[in-house]
Amino acid sequence: MGHLSSPRPVEDLLRELAPRVLGVLVRRHGGFDVCEDAVQEALLAAATGWPADGIPDNPTGWLVTAASRRLVETWRSDAARRRREERYGQATAPPDPVPEVDDTLTLFFLCCHPALTAPSQVALTLRAVGGLSTAEIARALLVPEATVAQRISRAKARIKAAGARFAQPTDAERTQRLPAVLHVLYLIFNEGYTASSGTALNRVELTAEAIRLARQLHERLPDDGEVAGLLALMLLTDARRPARTGPDGALVPLAEQDRARWDAALIREGVELISATLPRAVPGPFQLQAAIAAVHDEAPSAEQTDWPQILAFYDLLAALAPGPMVTLNRVVAVAMVRGPETALAELDAASQGPSLAGHYRVDAVRAHLLDELGDVGAAREHYRRAAQRTRSLPEQQYLLDRARRT
């Protein structure tokens, strides 16, 4: 055994090694489903043993060996797989060195197979690529552990039924599945940055994991503009996290945040990344959102924000990738550039669509615009309506506070 280590570095190391170990097993033995189960058991054994015994000199080899032994035990316990046991019986102590092949990208695309639902893609990505346990995923997503286990089990069964191969995706497969991969990472980040329910506004473990995985994807696809755009968007958005809540955990809106608390290093990295990407890549939704975030982050104060430039980016984004949140954010930009009356008229038209009907953020934006126009009573009523419709307690408290102060 090697040096002793505290639990936190062990946990980080295991998350880093998980996709590599899984890739080695699937390449050697096939069967993503059984290999993934075996790797999880090896990770659990390491998580409980290494903090006390020390990290092995070859931690990857240790995990591969432990997982391979677990595979053989599984095959031995299944009478229907006797022949496979004979074929792979020597896997208890694999003599071959661990290959230097990095299978992270392959795992990304396998976890985002089109046969899977979005919740299953999220859970499987966090487990197979992120190295999180079922319990950790359940805590992060605020769902029962049994629900996560069921999603992962069904996802592996569907991958098996679809006959998906564990191999580098072809150019066509990569083009087809990359949007799903980016969408899954975006979902993970968003759920961590503004939790859709519960008492906490942020769940840092999810935002940190999304950024870590986005960095891995960018390392493997450095020339893809949307991969770079997503990473830049995450960095520029997460940079504001320290100022998003007050000492009591209450939500602090962007215009009122103490910008001295923003993470300057993340802002610098995000701005450099999107500045290098925009001139050379085909514009995409994540690049445009990152450009908007960069304009906000580079403004010395809320009053000095370049709103005309932000509105121009939102116009492009609405044409390229229209959606309900793009519409609402663009309405706010319209208010800053053309006035709240014009923005309110646009909100009235947009809110008739089914995607925004009854959404609490429509009421929140309407309340803000009515407040700007001096219609205090109506603004207060819409702040209260918005508070009733959100499941996030910090957002609810903020909206009720705005209603009281209006």
Image (cartoon, helix red, strand yellow):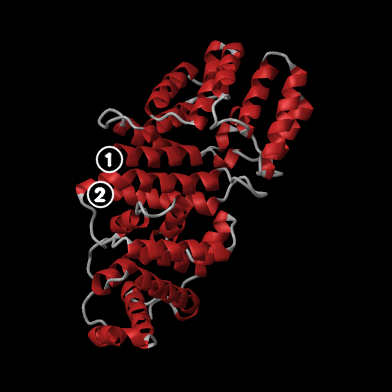
Q: How many marks?
A: 2
Reply above or below: 298 against 394: above
Mark earlier in primary sequence (2, 1): 2
As helix, strand or loop, the secondary structure at mark 2 comes to: helix
In the rendered view, does 49 fall on the left or right side of 358? left
Q: Secondary structure at mark 1?
A: loop
> To which quarter of the image does residue 155 belong?
bottom left
Any mark on residue 173, and which? 2
- Mark 1 residue type: Asp
- Label for residue 224? 1
Place residue 43 in its image quadrant. Answer: bottom left
Q: Residue at x 33, y 38 (%)?
A: 226
Q: Nearer the viewer, residue 56 or 200?
A: 200
Local packing at callout 2 (Cα closer than 10 Å; few below 14, some 14-19, many 20+) is: few
Q: Is residue 277 above or below residue 121?
A: above
| Label of residue 177 in the image | none
